[in-house]
Image: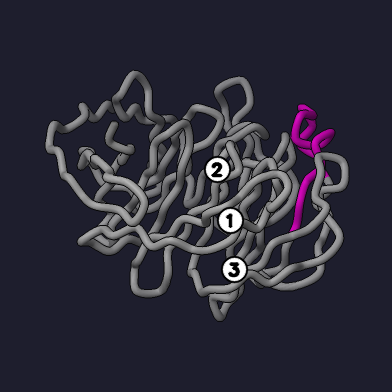
Amino acid sequence: MIFILGLFLLSVSAVTADLQCLLMPGKLRQIDAGAGQVYGVNDKGNIFKMVNNNWQQVSGLLTHVSVGPAGVWGVYKENRVFKLQDNKWKLVTGYLKQVDAGGDKFLAGVNAQDNIFCLMQNCTVSRSSLVTFLPLDGSLKYYSCGPFGCWGVNNVDDIFYRQDVSPNTCQGSKWQQVDGKLIMVEVGTDGSVYGVNSVGEAFKREGISAKTPTGTAWKRLDFCATFSHVTYDAGFLWLLSENDDVYKCYEEA
């Protein structure tokens, strides 16, 4: 199944720059962009990938999908974890409700009890179905990683950054709380951080770099709409509205 991109163009104003946003065809419940790719799932669990500016259906069913340097991973019923290997979904050991492949070839995620786990680089690149998820201290409902570290939010929307994360020490060392409240946070392949709060406002973390990995401040993106999910990669910001509409945005030159 292929969805052809719509031509509807919506102009919105952001705090730091003008954005042009395309309303895409179809509906998605969750979306993830990373390493030059974009995947999403709809409310029926069908999986889609962006190919040549079209949504192309991928075989299988998932409730959550993630793409990044660690590959393409997902979870399905009973929180079973799958890895896309040789264009087929391979079941691996472990149970998670949300996964994130944005780290440097290591995987991160949380389970149904909000326990936090990661999978070191040597396990993500392995072709074995038997892998060992390492536990982290603390409790989060959403966890996402990038080149400058990992970010997460807990069940009361507090925001945390995990220090000293690396491909071979994916557990890191300790948590640093960051100001603000978000229901979800996503780290881009370039280290940029975006999130959505409980009333559907979208935010970008400013000032992020290798020297200041937690950035300096949150900037609200001034959309005249509310959203449930956000992800960013390769110059494009992807947003899902509360009724599953998909928007693809970019900065106007």
Q: Which mark is residue 188?
A: 2
Element on which disc 1 rests: strand
The residue that appears at 38% across and 35% down in the rendered structure is 48
Q: Amino acid at mark 1?
A: Gln
**Image coordinates for residue 123, horizontal then vertical, percent:** 81, 36
Q: Which residues are magenta?
A: 117-131
Viewport quadrant of the N terminus: top left
What residue appears at the point 73 percent right and 52 percent down from the top-left corner? 94
Q: Position of residue 34 (x, y in %)?
A: 53, 35
Q: Which of these two is toward me, 239 or 2?
A: 239
- Of the numbered discs in the image, which one, if any, rests on residue 153? 3
Horizontal arrangement in the rendering, residue 135 relative to residue 225 (left or right): right
Closer to us: mark 2 or mark 1?
Answer: 2
Q: Position of residue 136 (x, y in %)?
A: 81, 63
Bin the neighbour count of mark 2 within 10 Å (Cα to Cα): few under 14, some 14-19, many 20 and up: many
Q: Disc 2 or disc 3, which is closer to the eye?
A: 2
Q: Earlier in the sequence, mark 2 or mark 3?
A: 3
Q: Which residue is mark 1?
A: 98
User: Quick check: 96 above or below 145?
Assistant: below
Between discs 3 and 1, the one toward the N terminus: 1
Three-letter residue code for mark 3: Val
Classed neighbour count for the residue bearing mark 1: other residues with Cα under 10 Å, few (<14), some (14–19), many (≥20): many
In the picture shown, does residue 180 fall above or below 39?
Answer: below
Amino acid under disc 2: Gly
At 45% across and 47% down in the image, what residue appears? 231
SS class, disc 3 = strand
